[in-house]
Every structure is written in structure tokens, then in C-alpha cells.
């Protein structure tokens, strides 16, 4: 009976190891897929924010240009203002 138990234990260990490896592979695959989705989403968000910043800078630049060209109030303050862009 002891031999039977040892054989069963050995077979059970092999099966458990196989199941564990399969589970680890599946979990790793799911985590990688989720991570890649998150990275893609982040890149899209960065790109959208860059475009939004560029539009805002263009709008600000056109307002400053119109104020300076007309010599209107605030033209001097606008001339000293500096715009920044993200170098991402």
C-alpha cells in the first residue's frame, strides 16, 4: 500500500506541476495583454494632450499677435510671456 501511495503522490505532483505551469503561462499572458493595452492608452492620451497643447499655444499666439499688431492694451505684457511645449 505504501508503494501505491508513493506512485499516486508522484503522479499527483506531476499533474499539479503541469497545471501550475499552465496557470502561470495564462496569467502572464493576461497581464502582458493588459499592460500593453494600458501603454497604448497612455500613448494615445499623450498624443491627444500634445495636440490640445499645440492648439492652445496657437490660439494664444494668435491672440498675442493680434494684440501686438493692434497696439492694444496688454500687448507689452503678452510680448514678455513665454509659451512652453512638451518635448515628449
Image (cartoon, grey):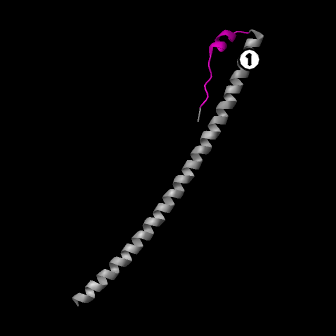
Nearest the camera: 75 or 80? 80
Q: Is residue 37 above or below residue 53?
A: below
Relative to residue 40, is residue 6 drawn left or right?
Answer: left
Nearest the camera: 64 or 4? 4
User: What segment carries the magenta color?
Assistant: 72-86
Q: Quadrant of residue 52?
A: top right
**SS assignment at label 1:** helix
Q: Residue furthest left?
A: 2
Relative to residue 55, is residue 13 drawn left or right?
Answer: left
Relative to residue 86, is residue 13 drawn left or right?
Answer: left
Magenta part mainly helix, strand or loop? loop
Q: Residue furthest bottom?
A: 1
Q: Is residue 84 above or below residue 8?
A: above
Give percent across and percent down for residue 84: 60, 25
Q: Quadrant of residue 42?
A: top right
Residue at 55%, 50% in the rendered image: 38
Q: Is residue 82 above or below residue 3?
A: above
Question: Is residue 79 one of those drawn in magenta?
Answer: yes
Give percent across and percent down for residue 87: 59, 32
Q: Which quadrant is home to the N terminus?
A: bottom left
Give percent across and percent down for residue 22: 45, 70
Count of picture labels: 1
Nearest the camera: 28 or 73? 28
Q: Which residue carries the number 1 mark?
A: 65
Give percent across and percent down for residue 51: 67, 35
Relative to residue 66, is residue 39 drawn left or right?
Answer: left
Q: Which quadrant is home to the C terminus?
A: top right
Residue at 54%, 58% in the rendered image: 33
Residue at 49%, 58% in the rendered image: 31
Residue at 66%, 13% in the rendered image: 79
Amino acid at each position: 500500500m505504501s508503494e501505491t501511495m508513493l506512485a499516486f503522490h508522484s503522479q499527483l505532483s506531476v499533474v499539479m506541476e503541469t497545471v501550475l505551469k499552465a496557470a502561470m503561462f495564462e496569467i502572464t499572458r493576461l497581464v502582458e495583454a493588459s499592460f500593453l493595452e494600458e501603454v497604448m492608452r497612455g500613448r494615445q492620451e499623450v498624443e491627444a494632450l500634445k495636440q490640445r497643447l499645440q492648439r492652445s499655444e496657437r490660439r494664444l499666439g494668435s491672440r498675442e499677435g493680434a494684440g501686438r499688431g493692434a497696439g492694444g492694451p496688454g500687448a507689452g505684457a503678452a510680448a514678455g510671456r513665454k509659451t512652453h511645449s512638451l518635448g515628449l
